[in-house]
Amino acid sequence: MFSPLIDGRPVNGPSLADTAPDVEALCDRLEGALRPARRWLVITGAGISAASGIPTYRDDSGAWLRSDPVQHQDFVESAATRRRYWARSMVGWPLVADARPNSAHHALAQLEAQGKMALLVTQNVDRLHQQAGHRRVIDLHGRLDRVRCRCCRRLLSRSGLQQRLLALNPGFHAICATARPDGDAEIDAEQLQDFNVPACCHCGGVLMPDVVFFGGSVPRRRVANINALLHQSEAVVVAGSSLAVFSGFRFCRLARELGKPLIVINRGSTRADSIATLKLPLDCGSALQQLAARLA
């Protein structure tokens, strides 16, 4: 049986707020927990990309920070919802397109190069792990850098679509807006009425980002592939995620069922705290950099 720990204490012990974390001591625990495991499955979330300037959905306590995101069914059924999405995306996309990997992405790529990782599963859609040189990545929730037609299923680049959006809506990109997660932006609803949404240039169908919206489902084959590699891994590491969304948490639950060590690195609370072998309230970048250096 595992003994879930936070900062080296049982989960039901003193709260994290009672003491500042001893970073060196916690990194010692992290190294000790992972050094015996030859192959890991790593799950990352929005906290990994925060240092690259991409906003997160939740704060350290797991509370929702932003307005409600677009739901899958609403996007499919409502032209008004699609207008809202693409208008906000046109303004917010450059933040994601211009983002660059940070120390956490580079540390994970280094750990993969050291042969420590069987697979990285990211809940992010920004492709920053791949930019950092990581090779074995499954984008659990899809990719924001491409768009799919719901009718003919053709794929096109999000950068190419951006040019069409700008051409159809001259001047709209200059509107002041507040950045939101995943290339979204907060824009006054009154400014969206005259926004023009492009259709598929091949069949005239509805274009949709190649991501899993809230309320949508991760493809079964993708989940099955991750489950198969999790069975073959000797430890599961979560970095920068509250795991509030079940699509990522399910793999933590499976790791526990299989008796595999589950290590969680996240400043705030997570859905897996009560089942984690070890919970470390650390900054992902510094913790992963130290881990990569120690195991090199």
Image (spheres, rainbow, N blue to C red):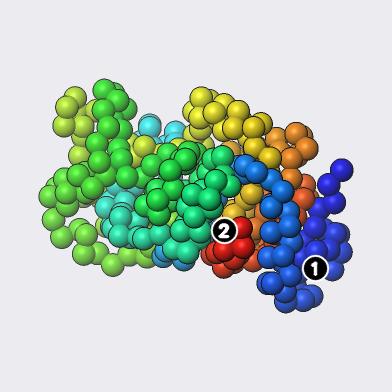
The percent coordinates of residue 209 (x first, y second) are 34, 39
Quarter holding the C terminus is: bottom right
Secondary structure beneath label 2: loop
Amino acid beneath label 2: Ala
Question: What's the residue at 30%, 40% (across, down)?
Answer: 146
Asked whether residue 68 appears in the rendered view, the answer is no
Secondary structure beneath label 1: loop
The percent coordinates of residue 1 (x first, y second) are 87, 43
Asked whether residue 41 appears in the rendered view, the answer is yes
Mark 2 crowd level (few <14, some 14–19, many ≥20, 10 Å Cα): few
Rendered position, 234 above or below 166: above
Q: Earlier in the sequence, mark 1 or mark 2?
A: 1
Amino acid beneath label 1: Ser
From the viewer's perspective, is the residue at label 1 or at label 2 nearer? 2
Question: What's the residue at 27%, 44% (across, down)?
Answer: 158
Rendered position, 102 above or below 36: below
Horizontal side of 67 relative to 154 (left or right) equals: right
The disc label shown at residue 296, or none = 2
The percent coordinates of residue 285 (x first, y second) are 54, 64
Q: Which residue is mark 1?
A: 15
The percent coordinates of residue 291 (x first, y second) are 61, 61
Question: What's the residue at 59%, 65% (across, down)?
Answer: 290
Horizontal side of 60 relative to 33 (left or right) equals: left
